[in-house]
Image (spheres, rainbow, N blue to C red):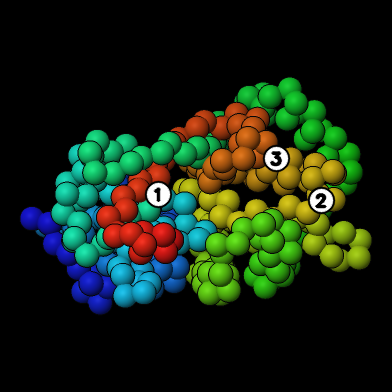
Amino acid sequence: MINLLKSIEIDREKWDNCIRSSKGSKPYAYSWFLDIMTPGWEALTEDDYESVFPLPQRRKFGVSYLTTPAFVQQLGAFSPDNSQTQAIDEFLDFLPPYYWLVDMGVGQRISHDHFKAVLRTNYELDLSKSYEKIYNGFTTHCRRNVDKSQKKKFELVDDISPEELISLFRNNKGKDIKRITSADYQRLNTLINFCIRNKKGRIIGVRKAQKKILYGLFLLEVKGIKTMLLVVNTPESRDKRVGYYVINELIRESASTKTMLDFAGSSIPSIASFMESFGSINKPYYQIYRNRLPWPVKLFR
C-alpha cells in the first residue's frame, strides 16, 4: 500500500536505509539532504519503506506544487528490489490532486500519458580501474589539456570556505542564473557546512599567488559516489585549463576503488563535452512536467 507522509511523519532511519540499499541511489534523496535543501518535503512510501518517492513540495500564491530545488539534480523512485521504473509510474498515479504543477528531475524513464518527459544528460565515471587504464580512456584532446595543465604547477588546496566558494559562484556563473534566490544560496551554504562537519563532502580548489580563488569545487561524498555538486570556474581558470588538472587529480586519488565520479551533467554542449572527454558515460535522467493550473495562474512559474 502506498502512503502519503508529511515531513514530520517520515522515519528518517528507514528512509535512508531504503535510499542506501537502492541501485543507482543518489545523495540528493537522503533525508538529511532533503531536510536542508527542501524543508517541509513530503513523501510517498510503499508499505514499510520498501520503495519511496520524495516530494519536494512548495507553495506559492496559495498553490502547492512540486519542483526539484536549485542545486538538486534529480530525485525519483528508490527501491532496493530494482523495480524503480515500475514504482515511479505507480507513485505518479498516486500523487495528490492538490499538486497542480509538477516540474521535477527523476532518475527513471516514465510511461505516463499525463506527464511530459525531457531527456537530460548526466555523466558518470567508474573509478574501479587503475589510473593508467582510466587515463588511456581520456580523449586525445583531454590528455593534451591534462598534460598542459600539469606543467603549470598548480596545487590543490582545501582551505576554501563555503562562503568563499558560493561567493565566487555568484560572481561568475551565478550572475546568469536568475532563478536562484538568496534563500537557495543560504540552504546551499548550510548543506556544505553540514557535509564538511559530518565527513560527507569537502571543498577543493586552486588559488592564485595572491590567494584569490582561481577554481573551486564542492564534492559530495556518499556511499562510494563522489558528486560534483558545485563547480566554479573563472575566466582565468578556463584559459589555464585548471578544470582538467583538478578532475585528473580527483581521478588519480580515487582510481582502483569502488567509487563512481558523478559529474552531475550539463545541458551546455561545451561542458558536456568536457565531462565526456574523461571517458565518462552518459547516465541520463528525465525532467517530468505537468501543469494543471488554470490560466492566468498557469503563468506563475
Most distant residue in the left direction: 1
Q: Tag 2, which secondary structure? A: helix
Going by the image, does 52 lie left or right of 23?
left
Which residue is tagged 1? 105
Which residue is tagged 3? 248
Going by the image, does 299 lie left or right of 192?
left
- Identified at 53% across, 74% down, the residue is 183
Closer to viewer: mark 3 or mark 1: 1
Within 10 Å of disc 1 (Cα), the crowding (few <14, some 14-19, many 20+) is: many
Type of amino acid under label 2: Pro
Say which of 179 and 166 sits in front. Answer: 179
Type of amino acid under label 1: Gly
Sequence-wise, the earlier of marks 2 and 1 is: 1
The CA span between labels 3 and 2 is 20 Å
Q: Is residue 84 visible?
A: no
What is the count of numbered marks?
Answer: 3
Within 10 Å of disc 3 (Cα), the crowding (few <14, some 14-19, many 20+) is: many
